[in-house]
Amino acid sequence: MTSAVRTRSSAELIGAEEPVLAHNYHPLPVVVARAEGAWVEDVEGRRYLDMLAGYSALNFGHRHPALIEAAHRQLDRLTLTSRAFHNDRLAEFAERLAALTGLDMVLPMNTGAEAVESGVKVARKWAYDVKGVPADRATIVVAADNFHGRTTTIVSFSTDEVARAGFGPFTPGFRVVPYNDLAALEAAVDETTAAVLIEPVQGEAGVIVPDDGYLAGVRELTRRAGCLFVADEIQSGLGRTGRTLAVDHEAVVPDVVLLGKALGGGIVPVSAVVARREVLEVLHPGEHGSTFGGNPLAAAVGTAVVELLETGEFQRRAAELGGILREGLRSLVGEGVVGFRSRGLWAGVDVDPALGTGREISERLMREGVLVKDTHGSTIRLAPPLTITAEELQGALRTLEKVLVQRT
């Protein structure tokens, strides 16, 4: 990578943000100026291996050539029409995304939170129009420790008090049950239930992987109860876990799949609600919309993302490299790591609290040239681009070992 033009240092740029940017994030003290593949470069020219990949938004790495080419081609033709008109890229995007997921129809949106909000609206509308739930009585069952976004409705059913405190009153109509507990889920479902909304793997909670059979159990339970199974695959989907979708590990087809992050190829925000025809056909003109949803640039990039996934290459890479990640972490258990959970190229690593918080461990790794992000307590998340090489991944694991050993 060619070094960026350096007019201000990292310290100067971080200091400049303080008086003008809202403090809704607590970023690591690194200022990224350029990136390529699995690597980023700061304004001083220091290089870091990106082991976070934008919380899975960069599944295909930074500036994947096929995705950059698709974006450039479209930028020279047409970027935005709004849905007031048709555009020549949207139909192909929707057709190929529906085929990739094994579902029928697509509602294009922009951000992950917007996809979740749209999924909630669609589930409620389906409950009234198709299931026959009395007006304004539809309920949606969700899991504790979920993360679906931070809009007002979504934090209404969060169990994270940091996300909730100070933002009430909250939206009613949600029931929270423990994750990975089919008995609790069954007890919460009744004739008013529109949907069960869960993450097939809970990302923000620390990459919590449910027991084998849980997802199949959710599918069977919702089928018996006559409600929808809505799978939030915004972080877990599109190759991250070694399959196209995380639900594919149990050969489960939900009624609704929520996608985002990697769907935009690390270039533009793209999200979608993908569902059975009977579900999405409850929407009629004027009932839901988005100015930028399905715009030509997003559709062109999204189609290029789907094309990459259609080959199966990235799913195979995530599965194979996930084995290296899992074995490397297993070797660190008892050597500073007290436990971990992984699926594909995605892991939540619990570090001995005596060695520091997750934030402190992340800062030490940053100083050694590896970027990760903490979650709760002393847990860090690893989610490298699926384009990372085995050698790069092994190097990151050696760096983690070095950081832990230095503190033992």
Image (cartoon, grey):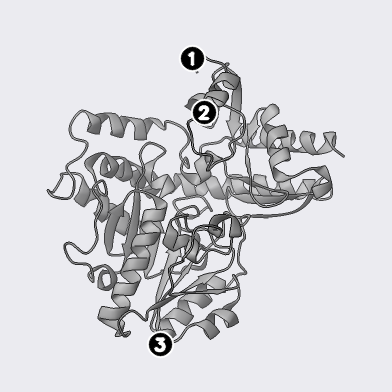
Q: Is residue 355 left or right of residue 35?
A: right
Q: Residue 2 shows which numbered tag?
A: 1
Element class at badge 3: loop
Name the residue type under label 1: Thr
Q: Residue at x 80, y 39 (%)?
A: 404
Q: Quarter of the image for the C terminus: give it.
A: top right
**Closer to us: 165 or 244:** 165
Q: Give the CA separation, mark 1 to mark 2.
A: 25 Å
Q: Residue at x 84, y 33 (%)?
A: 406
Element class at badge 2: helix
Q: Is residue 335 visible?
A: no
Name the residue type under label 3: Glu
Q: Residues within 10 Å of mark 2 (few under 14, many from 20)?
A: few
Name the residue type under label 2: Glu
Element class at badge 1: loop
Q: Residue furthest right?
A: 408
Q: Residue 17 shows which numbered tag?
A: 2
**Percent position (x, y) of residue 210?**
60, 66
Circle 1/circle 2 CB separation < 8 Å:
no
